[in-house]
Amino acid sequence: MRRLTVIYWICTGLTALLMGMGSIPNILSSADSIALFQQIGYPTYLLPFLGVAKLLGVIAIIVPGFPRIKEWAYAGLTFDLAGATYSFLAIGAPVAVIASMIPGFLVIAGSYVTYHKRRKAKISLSLEV
């Protein structure tokens, strides 16, 4: 159980770092974020919305409890990353840019899978007592 917890917190911490660091420039509508959105062809008014949504998702996966909210948060973070990947594919971004999304998917999946394994293990332990 200890090993599983360590893996969970490493993956969750990396997910929080990745998505949290990406949310700040979006919330602030930084010049780089605006330029990226214009390159992709998205309206810049979406920036703060996506930034706040990502930040709320990060908070939801870090705060203990609230399993249903965590499910939605993991889905939202995955959809955000999938949408970014598809957007880069649609504009013909270099393969390196698209490949750079893979670690994001891996840490989100690692966090999600280990979250459920830990939860199942805790339920099993409580039933044994």
Image: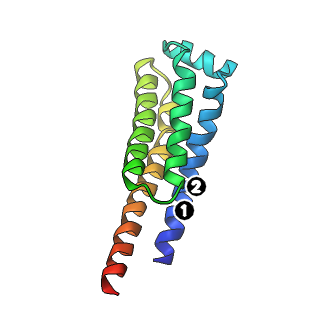
In the image, 126 versus 27, the foreground residue is 126
Q: Pointer 1: residues within 10 angstroms few (<14), some, or many (20+)?
A: some
Residue 89 image-quadrant placement: top left
Query: Please, what secondary structure does the residue beneath circle 2 have?
Result: helix
Q: Which mark is residue 9?
A: 1
- Image quadrant where one finds the C terminus: bottom left
Looking at the rendered structure, the kind of residue marked 1 is: Trp
Looking at the rendered structure, the kind of residue marked 2 is: Gly
| Residue drawn where x is 54% and y is 54% of the image | 62
In the image, 67 versus 13, the foreground residue is 67
Residue matched to label 2 = 13
Residues tagged 2 and 1 counted as in contact (Cβ below 8 A): yes
Image coordinates of residue 33 in percent, x first then y, are 62, 22
Image coordinates of residue 123 in percent, x first then y, are 34, 73
Q: Pointer 2: residues within 10 angstroms few (<14), some, or many (20+)?
A: some
| Residue drawn where x is 69% and y is 18% of the image | 31
Q: Is residue 97 above or below residue 1?
A: above
- Direction bottom: furthest residue: 129
In the image, 91 versus 67, the foreground residue is 67
| Residue drawn where x is 55% and y is 17% of the image | 37
Image coordinates of residue 97 in percent, x first then y, are 52, 31
Residue 25 image-quadrant placement: top right
Image coordinates of residue 111 in percent, x first then y, are 46, 56
Query: Please, what secondary structure does the residue beneath circle 1 have?
Result: helix
Q: Is residue 43 above or below residue 94?
A: above
